[in-house]
Amino acid sequence: MAAGKDMILLPLVLLLSQLTAMSAATTCALQGGFELPVFMSEGTFTIGGIFPLHYRVELPQTDFKTPPLTAQCRGFDPRAFRWALTMRLAAEEINGNRDLLPNHTLGYKIFDSCATPVTAQRAVLAVLNGEDSGASAMCSESEGSSPLFAIIGESGSSQSIVVSRTLQPFRIPMISYFSTCACLSDRTQFPTFFRVVPSDDYQVKAVAQLLKHFGWTWIGVVTEDHDYGRFALQGLKREIQNTDICLAYHEMIPKDYTTEKVLKILEVMRTSTARVVVVFSGEGEFYPFLKEFSKQNITGIQWIASEAWVSASVLAETYPFLDGTIGFAVRQGDVPNLTDYVKTVDPWNYPSNALVQELWETLYACSPRNATSVNTPLKPCTGHETVQEQHSAYLGSSSPRVAYNVYKGVYAIAHSLHNLLQCIPGSGPFPNGSCADINNIQPWQLQRYLQDVSFVISGEKVNFDMKGDSIPSYDLINWQRDADGEIQFVTVGLYEYDGGAEGSGKELVIDMDKVKWTGQRKEVLVSVCSDSCPPGFRKAVRAGEPICCFDCVPCDSGKISNETDSIDCMACPEDFWSNTGGTHCIPKEIEFLSHDAMGITLTVIAVVGACLTISVLAVFLYHRRTPVVRVNNSELSFFILLSLTLCFLCALIFIGEPTAWSCMLRHTAFSITFSLCISCILGKTLVVLAAFTATRPGNNIMKWLGPKQQRVIIFSCTLVQVIICAAWLISAPPYPNRNTQYQRSKIILECSVGSDLAFWCVLGYIGLLACLCFVLAFLARKLPGNFNEAKFITFSMLIFCAVWLAFIPAYVSSPGKFTVAVEIFAILASSFGLLLCLFAPKCYIILIKPEKNTKNHLMGKDK
């Protein structure tokens, strides 16, 4: 919070720096008077202390004719007075410690800064020059020396900037206990500045981690209209820039406070879906805002407090709706005997200390009997009044925070001095391993040891980084109301920054069993713009809205997301596919015509067809001497039946997982067996046609179609197909292929034909033979005779051609294993067509009508 008034003081700081530089070039002389220290003690080593014992200043009127009077400090602050007493207590403890600074004592001078930079500079000059304005201690020393070794101060960053720059020419280190401005970490501007309180940069890191921890991604921010609020907001935005946390709104409490402006802010809070509100504001600015908030019916808000108001008892006791507030506070620690020590300070023990008198006036609204001022409207009191629990601002020493920082600062100086005194020549930190001259120790030498100091106090390790900052740590405070209705600030966690760029995840530790939420909720309040996208979905940001507002879109087929709130879906590897939910990649289903229901059905049909054909062959062999068999050229019939048997059996090669041999065999076997079959039918057609035309006088065509010539015709026609297949196998043979393009969710194991031209040449040649047979049989269909085989050949070729013409579009359009099934069906259908058309009538006569199995009947001579 103390960073809020830093920037407005730059002109003043520059002026003071110039004045300091000018003083170095002129005669050293004290100008004006200086206030006496509030507390002081002589010692071997003297340190200074500057505390805002008053929180405002009244500037005197001036007529520009006479020198202005000294500004008057007003508004006594009991809490800051307790900080000053903590410094005294620490110094007295150290002086009584035989192990720390043995044979040496720590003296101190404590001054009041009145919480303003100008008075703070007066205080630091008073510390530097001693209590008597007539004798200049600084001027009496040699150049660069000082009777002062270090300073504990200040609380406000604005005051610390001025004090540090005033001390810089003398190279005197100072340790701040409550200045949090990040600008003070700049070693080029503040080379002698140290602090035991975290920088504001770390507070926003802690808040960002708190939001991440509870999954609060949709938040509102309310800040005061000062630099503190602005810088805190900038820091918070920087911390959440690359996260999934978004600001639903940012509202600023106006400087010129009006109800109308506040109501506009409250309306934004009421209508927003953000249920978590982070507030960077001092309690003074936040108090009137909450007063108006309490009048509105706004509920379900989870407040996140900054360190500026997280321990504000006034707010906690006044506004019950703040119960459950959570935020970060300066780390508390143990200051032994502090409670008892502050109780020893009263007007009887310090009769001449004006600030002790003011303390009593503030706590009891009375004037002690031994008070030096008699012009007071306050009622008199004894000065023996007992400090009560209700004086928490002064007595709140059971869990000190800022006072604990003062305690650490004093001990850091003591340990540094101790290490300096224990230096062994040859192993010191200065050139050639030298040590400081114990009889002439310089402040800059102490600073060298202060930079490297490391010790443990109240279980906490204290040291400084190269910027003069201590290890950043906060207590996580939760506002809880006990059974008696009293508000309690319960420590429920701890934040310690470990230096990780993105945070290690171990910096923030929370005891969830201790946390109590706003509205007596038992579960963590949810504050998101959009619900999380489950696995199987991805986030699609809504146009024109923050990234926290999104829609959940299912992953496309073949893509998955296996975590919550995935930004994109990952494509599965080539041999994998997404499951139904889109959460895992599973192996693609491998599809081929296997021995499933379809494969078994086709296998049975093929086997039945082959058995039926063999049965017909057996019948023909048994009745080979009968007229029906003999008149129809028994040799060609036997050839046809054998080739049909092979046609039925070659269908079996198409069933099962494709291999290199099966792919080459299935197409070549199918084409050659069908070519053999059609060639035999062609030969028979020619014989039938020649037999009926040979009866004409002078026609001796039958001598050209004898058994040898028939075999030559069959062999020649089949040889052409064999040559085509051989060329196919040599140039681009069929091969097994894993087809993942037709159906991306499956891997179709198929036989690629290799050469499309060769494949269609094979089918085209079979079609050519079939068409030739059909034409010749069609021409002989009306020849005389009761058993004109040309009619049956015509029907068989008609069925054959119809089947294979229908096969072409079905083959091209059938997916996956159905492509193979269509081809098998065409083979079986055409084979059954040939078998039934050519041999069913003959088997009917042979087996059913044997009386017609005579030559006369076949020649049509029956009467």
Image (cartoon, rainbow, N blue to C red):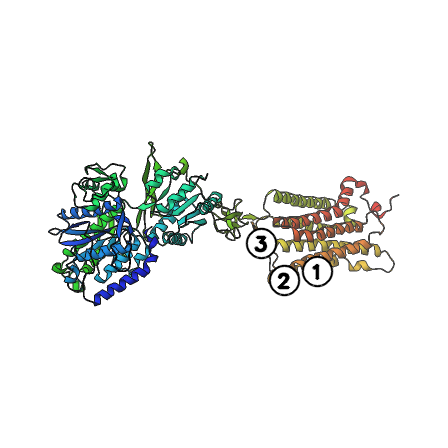
The mark found on residue 741 in the picture is: 3
Q: Do the CB atoms of the residues marked 2 and 1 lie less than 8 Å apart?
A: no
The crowding category of the residue bearing disc 3, from other C-alpha atoms within 10 Å (few below 14, some 14 to 19, many at least 20), is few
Alpha carbon separation for disc pair 1 and 3: 41 Å
- Give the mark, 2 or 3, whose residue is nearer the N terminus: 2
Which x, y percent locates residue 245?
43, 49
761 lies left or right of 162: right
Counting residues from the start of the chain, the first of labels 2 and 1 encountered is: 1
For the residues marked 2 and 1, what is the alpha-carbon distance in whole angstroms?
Answer: 17 Å
Q: Nearer the viewer, residue 348 or 167?
A: 348
State the SS at label 2.
helix
Point out residue 328 in the picture as x, y percentages from the top left corner.
Answer: 34, 46
Answer with mark 1 or mark 3, whichever residue precedes in sequence.
Answer: 1
Residue type beneath disc 2 = Ala
Residue shown at 34% from the left, 54% from the top: 5
Q: Is residue 290 left or right of residue 750?
A: left
Amino acid type at image mark 3: Gln
Discs 2/1, front: 2
Residue 217 visible here: no
Other-residue count near label 2 (Cα within 10 Å), few / some / many at <14 / 14–19 / ≥20: few
- Residue 392 in which image quadrant: top left
Pointer 1: what residue? Answer: 716
> Left or right: where does residue 402 sit relative to residue 259?
left
Question: Residue at label 2?
Answer: 727
- Which secondary structure lies at badge 3? loop
Q: Nearer the viewer, mark 2 or mark 3?
A: 3
> Mark 2 and mark 3: span between their CA atoms?
29 Å
Image quadrant where one finds the C terminus: top right
